[in-house]
Amino acid sequence: MAHPLDHLPILRMNGAGNEILVLDLRVSEHELAPQEARAIAKAPGLRFDQLMALHRPRRPGDDAYMRIYNIDG
């Protein structure tokens, strides 16, 4: 069975010495859970300091709802 995150684009960015992954979930019904963020950090080639997960907007007029996960808490 395919995971809901399969085939979604992950962008890698760097800022102020931090590795940042941006995961765009706006086309998905899936809400990223903290344990999933930790699992992504352990995946080969996906190590990050911060993961920015873009979700569908929660308020009219917004473009997205964003959650930020720090790997070190």
Image: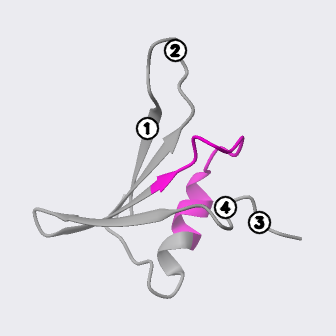
Look at label 3 and name its amino acid.
His
Using the numbered discs, state the Cα–Cα distance from disc 2 to disc 1 in whole angstroms.
12 Å
Left or right, 39 with reference to 47: right
Residue drawn at the location 77% of the way across and 65% of the way down: 3
Query: In the rendered image, which residue does mark 1 sit on?
Result: 66
- Marks 3,4: beta carbons within 8 A: yes
Q: Which mark is residue 59?
A: 2
| Mark 3 vs mark 4, CA separation in Å | 5 Å
Going from N to C along the chain, the mark reached first, 3 or 1, is 3
Disc 1 and disc 4 in contact, CB within 8 angstroms: no
The residue pinned by badge 4 equals 5
Is the Cβ of the residue at disc 3 closer than 8 Å to that at disc 1?
A: no
Distance from Cα at disc 3 to Cα at disc 1: 21 Å
* SS for callout 1: strand
Residue 35 at x, y percent in the picture: 61, 60
Nearest the camera: 65 or 41? 65
Q: Mark 3 highlights which residue?
A: 3
